[in-house]
Amino acid sequence: MNIHHLELFYHVARNGGISHAVRKMPYGIQQPAVSGQILQLEDHLGLKLFHRRPFALTPAGRELFEFVEPFFGKVLETGARLRGETSQRLRLAAPGAILRDHLPKLLEQHRRAFPQLRLSLHDANQAAAEELLRKQDVDLAITELEGRPASGIHCCELLKLPLQLLLSPARRIRSANEFWKKGKIVDPLICMPAK
């Protein structure tokens, strides 16, 4: 088997399809090239390794992934460790608002203490952050909790923000309780989108 074909298969299986794999691979390669080389691997084996739509590994694909994953899953980490970079890297997932509005000041404060720190940032909500953690694509996630964390995810509450009601000073209502006691709420409200 061609080792490059096995590497491409690993990325496709790990990322849930060819188009997702092409976006996440550590080097540039076009989708048609990946498709062609995966077809060559399947021809060589005489087996179909995955269904394209919806993406799902076949039993042979699962067996091959279990075989190649321990090696290809640690290639980048091993290279970084050999270069002495593992203790100087942090891969962080957080929603865009946290990355944009809060993280720059925090990083500026810590840059002097950790000048060699290489930081990788990923824009992600809770569900996406949990998936990145599960795949070990990030080391840490900071996010708003939209629900109970998935099993196996260690969660620590950093802060809790109370719900606030902001009203025009011209309004006669002075508390949220007064607002909710009204029989029918006709005022426009701004809130988080429904799940």
Image (cartoon, rainbow, N blue to C red):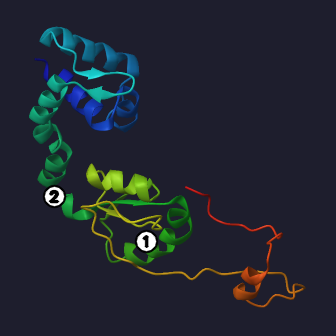
Say the numbered circle drawn on residue 22: none
In the image: residue 143, left or right of residue 97 = left
- Please give the count of numbered marks on the rendered protein: 2
Measured in 3D between alpha carbons, the distance from the residue under mark 1 to the one under mark 2, in whole angstroms, is 22 Å
Task: Name the kind of residue labelled 2 in the image.
Answer: Gly
Foreground of the two, 86 or 163: 163
Residue 149 placement (x, y as % from top left): 35, 64
Pointers 1 and 2 in contact (CB under 8 A)? no
When asked about the image quadrant of residue 189, the answer is bottom right
> Residue 69: in sight, yes or no?
yes
Within-10-Å neighbours for mark 2: few <14, some 14–19, many 20+: few
Q: Can you identify the residue that label 2 sits on?
A: 84
Residue 161 placement (x, y as % from top left): 54, 81
Please tell me which residue is depicted at 38% across the width and 16% down the height of the picture.
Answer: 32
Please tell me which residue is depicted at 16% across the width and 47% down the height of the picture.
Answer: 79
Vertical relation: 143 (above or below) 178: above
Residue 69 placement (x, y as % from top left): 15, 38
> Residue 26: in sight, yes or no?
no
Query: Element at badge 1?
Result: helix
Residue 192 placement (x, y as % from top left): 62, 63
When asked about the image quadrant of residue 74, the answer is top left
In the image: residue 51, left or right of residue 142 = left
Mark 1 or 2, nearer chain start: 2
Q: Can you identify the residue that label 1 sits on?
A: 107
Question: Which residue sits furthest bottom?
Answer: 174
In the image: residue 155, left or right of residue 64 = right
> Split into 4 quadrants, where in the image is the C terminus?
bottom right
When asked about the image quadrant of residue 46, the answer is top left
